[in-house]
């Protein structure tokens, strides 16, 4: 085996090791976030609403597979709720229809 073949095998092995390390890091982070989402499940509905979530959002996040980060579900849910609550400013403002009242001049 020549040096170029050996170095290409080493590079592919290094790439695979790097990919494995990233996958392991992502899994550890997903499990950490899952634990934090479980803590959110202990909040009452008012507290969840204060941070822009509903109980069903937390349940959906916890229903994700263990390999996925459940916090992304919460981020998407909070964004969806905030978009739903924003008033639509794209429409032209409507002027109120109030009749003009002019003072009556009296002759003295």
Image (cartoon, grey):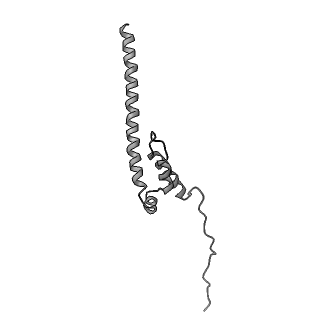
**72 versus 87 height, above or below:** above
- The residue lying toward the viewer, choosing from 13 and 66, is 66
**54 versus 69 height, above or below:** below
Quadrant of image for the N terminus? top left
Residue at the extreme bottom: 108
Is 23 left or right of 85, judged from the image as shown? Answer: left
Is 38 left or right of 107, judged from the image as shown? Answer: left
Q: Where is residue 57 in the image (x, y as percent from the top left)?
A: 49, 53
Q: Position of residue 108 (x, y in %)?
A: 60, 92
Q: Residue at x 39, y 24 (%)?
A: 15
Residue at the extreme top: 2
- The residue lying toward the viewer, choosing from 5 and 96, is 5
Q: Position of residue 60 (x, y in %)?
A: 50, 50
Q: Can residue 54 be seen in this view?
A: no
Residue 14 lies in what quarter of the image? top left
Q: Residue at x 40, y 20 (%)?
A: 12
Q: Can residue 60 be seen in this view?
A: yes
Q: Position of residue 44 (x, y in %)?
A: 43, 61
């Amino acid at each position: 085996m020549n040096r170029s073949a050996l170095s290409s095998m080493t590079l592919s092995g290094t790439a695979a090791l790097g990919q494995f390390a990233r996958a392991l890091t992502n899994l550890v982070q997903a499990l950490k976030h899952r634990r934090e989402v479980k803590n959110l499940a202990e909040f009452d509905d008012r507290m969840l609403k204060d941070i822009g979530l509903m109980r069903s959002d937390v349940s959906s996040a916890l229903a994700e597979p263990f390999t996925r980060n459940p916090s992304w579900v919460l981020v998407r849910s909070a964004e969806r709720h905030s978009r739903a609550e924003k008033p639509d400013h794209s429409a032209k403002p409507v002027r109120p229809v109030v009749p003009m009242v002019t003072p009556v001049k009296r002759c003295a």
